[in-house]
Image (cartoon, grey):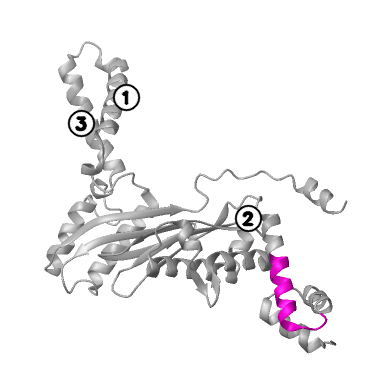
């Protein structure tokens, strides 16, 4: 069966593959459009498998928050290079995955990848297609979601950091501009300050005991404390524990947009101003590529291997 240049163009539009690849597929399929699509998909799967071993440490965090503040989700989707992370098709895929995670509440990453993202195609199917068209390894690394409460998202540096800040607010406050601004400000603080805990009550005893142990050793080794009774040194250590809370707990941190006021007090002030109750229940912070060991490629060697 013969085919025309218009058929090649149509196949390219259908699959987003290169012109020559489309021409070869139509030739192999003897002009059968459906078979050509199938052949390209098969080749796309082979391309995805070939690239699967390559490190994807770049990428973006994408967030989705439904109207009303829930459900909400944030995802991290990785790719090999910063350049490809700015690809509009890649970014749209990451955003679609975040929305799907929020709406369908999959129990884990495996369940998310098995959900239908496009008609007749799962997230995994679409991921493999993106690998074939963008020509870099792509991995949906993780996601997290909130299914209740009022959630505000914040994406920093074009997707390098993604944050969800979840609050419980009284009726009528979900559309209040001051409450929305509060959520955004706190989400920005989480992005910037990276607190380890929401509140000092969330710090486990083992962490406190270890911190006390370290501070006690430091205090006893300090020349200025020589000769001081243990009881005095103990009080000094407890004072420094308070500093640990102010550095590592969001609600005890100084509010970055305030004037010597903690986040906890700022939340209380906003609640009083709007005439309702506001409680920060939690936050999620993703940093793109966090914990992934990036491969230091020898560019000259890679080019040499390609021309052999």
Question: Of callouts 3 and 1, which one flags the residue occurring earlier in the amino acid sequence?
Answer: 1
Magenta part of the protein: which range?
A: 30-44
Q: Position of residue 12 (x, y in %)?
A: 72, 79
Residue found farthest to the top:
227
Residue, disc 1:
214
The residue lying at 27 percent from left, 53 percent from top is 255
Q: Main secondary structure of the magenta part?
A: helix
Residue, disc 3:
239
**From the viewer's perspective, is residue 218 above or below residue 108?**
above
Question: Of callouts 3 and 2, which one flags the residue occurring earlier in the amino acid sequence?
Answer: 2
The residue lying at 19 percent from left, 22 percent from top is 234
Q: Is label 1 in a helix, a strand or a loop?
A: helix
Q: Camera-side residue: 69 or 8?
A: 8
Report if the CB atoms under discs 3 and 1 are less than 8 Å apart: no
Residue, disc 2:
80
The quadrant holding residue 231 is top left
Question: Of callouts 1 and 2, which one flags the residue occurring earlier in the amino acid sequence?
Answer: 2
Q: Residues within 10 Å of mark 1 (few under 14, many from 20)?
A: few
Left or right: residue 107 versus residue 277 is: right
């Amino acid at each position: 069966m013969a085919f025309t240049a218009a058929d090649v163009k149509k196949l390219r539009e259908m699959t987003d593959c290169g012109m020559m690849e489309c021409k070869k597929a139509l030739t192999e399929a003897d002009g059968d459009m459906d078979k050509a699509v199938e052949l390209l998909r098969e080749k796309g799967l082979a391309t995805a498998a070939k690239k699967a071993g390559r490190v994807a440490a770049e990428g973006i965090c994408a967030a989705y928050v439904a109207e009303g503040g829930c459900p909400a989700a944030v995802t991290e989707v990785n790719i090999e290079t910063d350049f490809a992370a700015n690809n509009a098709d890649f970014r749209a895929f990451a955003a679609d995955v975040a929305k799907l995670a929020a709406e369908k509440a999959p129990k884990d990453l495996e369940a998310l990848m098995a959900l239908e993202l496009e008609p007749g195609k799962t997230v995994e199917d679409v991921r493999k297609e993106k690998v074939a068209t963008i020509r870099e390894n792509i991995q949906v690394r993780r996601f997290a979601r909130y299914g209740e409460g009022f959630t505000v998202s914040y994406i920093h540096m074009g997707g390098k950091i993604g944050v969800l800040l979840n609050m419980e607010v009284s009726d009528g406050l979900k559309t209040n501009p001051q409450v929305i601004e509060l959520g955004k400000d706190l989400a920005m603080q989480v992005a910037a300050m990276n607190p380890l805990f929401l509140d000092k009550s969330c710090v486990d005893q083992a962490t406190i005991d270890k911190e006390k142990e370290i501070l006690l050793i430091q205090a006893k080794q300090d020349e200025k404390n020589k000769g001081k009774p243990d009881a005095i040194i103990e009080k000094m250590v407890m004072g420094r524990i308070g500093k640990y809370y102010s550095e590592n707990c969001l609600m005890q941190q100084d509010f970055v947009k305030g004037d010597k006021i903690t986040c906890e007090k700022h939340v209380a002030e906003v609640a009083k101003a709007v005439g309702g109750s506001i409680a920060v229940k939690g936050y999620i912070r993703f940093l793109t590529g966090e914990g992934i060991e990036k491969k230091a490629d020898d560019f000259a060697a890679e080019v040499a291997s390609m021309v052999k």
